Image (cartoon, rainbow, N blue to C red):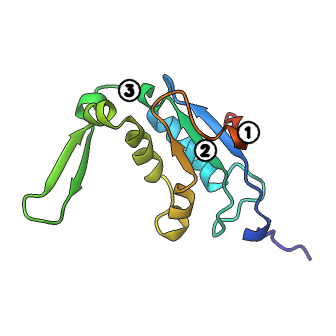
Amino acid sequence: MRTTFMQKKENVERKWYVVDATDQVLGRLATNIATVLRGKHKPTFTPHIDGGDYVIVVNADKVALTGNKLLEKKYYSHSHYPGGLNVRTAKNILDNQPHKIVEFAVKGMLPKGPLGDDMYRRLYVYAGPDHKHQAQQPEALPKIK
């Protein structure tokens, strides 16, 4: 009788990947990043184990948005006080905090709860071409189906 393979968190081997976001569409980029952070690209994927890899995103300020999303897409936050709604457009975020737009997109695609929080901590986003993770020897992110 065969048994189903279940990965153990002690046996997880993590790699480092680097992604250049220049002229890549935000949604498609975020989907690939979330897949790698979750570990779904590995044959040892187990849904309840954090088996994903580390991802470094560079040039987040050059990410592409299709259609009129740059001006029409809105990001909402609320301070939980009356009148505390804060609305920002994608253009405003790209101008002031370009790394946040990629982080918001990827975080929304990860599972909610402690498991997703652990996956999200392995994402590093930088607005420019430089990052501080050369010692980890990151590879270029392979194309994911």
Instruction: Classify mark 1: helix, strand or loop.
Output: loop
Mark 2 in CB contact with mark 3 (< 8 angstroms): no
Near mark 1 (Cα within 10 A), the count class, few <14, some 14-19 or many ≥20, is few
Quadrant into which the C terminus falls: top right
- Say which residue appears at 38% left-offset and 28% top-offset: 65
Which tag is nearer the camera, tag 2 or tag 1? 1
**Mark 3 highlights which residue?**
66
Mark 1 vs mark 3, CA separation in Å: 32 Å
Quadrant into which the N terminus falls: bottom right
Q: Is residue 132 left or right of residue 46?
A: left
Identify the image quadrant of residue 64: top left
Which tag is nearer the camera, tag 2 or tag 3? 2
- The type of residue carrying mark 1 is Gln
Q: Residue at the far bottom: name it.
A: 1
Identify the image quadrant of residue 105: top left
Instruction: Classify mark 3: helix, strand or loop.
Output: loop
Pointer 2 or 3: first along the chain: 2
Is 145 or 86 nearer to us in this picture? 86
In the image, residue 54 lies at what x, y percent? 64, 49
Q: Is residue 31 left or right of residue 49?
A: left
Is 45 or 84 nearer to us in this picture? 84
Instruction: Classify mark 2: helix, strand or loop.
Output: strand
Q: Is residue 129 left or right of residue 71?
A: right
**Mark 2 highlights which residue?**
55
Mark 1 in CB contact with mark 3 (< 8 angstroms): no
Mark 2 vs mark 3, CA separation in Å: 24 Å
**Mark 1 highlights which residue?**
137
